[in-house]
């Protein structure tokens, strides 16, 4: 029961930040480029650890542990869409 209360309280504290991230509109190509560069396309922590060409172990992506992961990824997606749809730019460099 205590863990449920802690998780619920934690989510309530982040609600304003989530709403803010969800409401950011992209109307500037400089901002869109900045967001696409600053927010990685995939988790930078995920990797295979190898030694002498043999895979020792795999480090799973930890980004999903971030409580704002979905909102940040959504913001990056909106920036990519703005560059592709509104600016007509090639976004393959960010994929």
Image (cartoon, grey):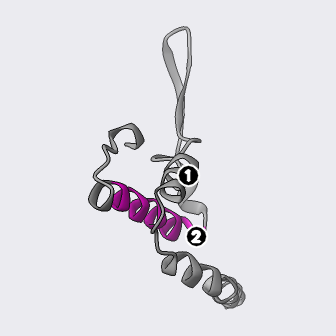
Q: Is residue 49 above or below residue 76?
A: above
Q: Is residue 80 left or right of residue 20?
A: left
Residue shown at 44%/67% (left/top)? 74
CA neighbours of label 1 inside 10 A, class few (<14), some (14 to 19), many (20+): few
**Pointer 2 and pointer 1: residues touching (CB < 8 Å)?**
no
Left or right: 22, with 3 as reference point = left
- First along the sequence among labels 2 and 1: 1
Q: Is residue 7 above or below residue 79?
A: below
Disc 2 marks which residue?
68
Look at 52% across and 54% down and name the residue there.
30
Q: CA distance from mark 2 to mark 1?
A: 19 Å
**Magenta region:** 67-83
Q: Residue at x 41, y 43 (%)?
A: 94
Residue most toward the top?
52
User: On the picture, is 9 further left or further right than 71?
Assistant: right
Does the magenta segment cover residue 73? Answer: yes
Residue 87 placement (x, y as % from top left): 33, 56
Tell me which secondary structure the magenta stretch mostly adopts: helix
Q: Secondary structure at mark 2?
A: loop
Give the class, few, some or many, for how many residues have Cα within 10 Å of label 2's Cα (few <14, many ≥20): some
Q: Nearer the viewer, residue 52 or 41?
A: 41
Residue 94 highlighted magenta (yes or no): no
The image shows a total of numbered marks equal to: 2
- Badge 1 is on which residue? 34
Residue 83 place in picture, x, y as percent:
36, 55
């Amino acid at each position: 029961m205590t863990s449920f209360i802690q998780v619920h309280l934690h989510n309530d504290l982040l609600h304003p930040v989530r709403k803010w991230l969800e409401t950011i509109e992209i109307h500037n190509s400089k901002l869109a480029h900045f967001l696409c560069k600053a927010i990685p396309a995939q988790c930078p922590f995920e990797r295979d650890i190898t030694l002498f060409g043999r895979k020792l172990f795999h480090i799973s992506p930890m980004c999903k542990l971030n409580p704002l992961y979905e909102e940040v990824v959504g913001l990056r997606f909106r920036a990519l869409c703005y560059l592709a749809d509104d600016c007509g730019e090639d976004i393959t460099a960010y994929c």
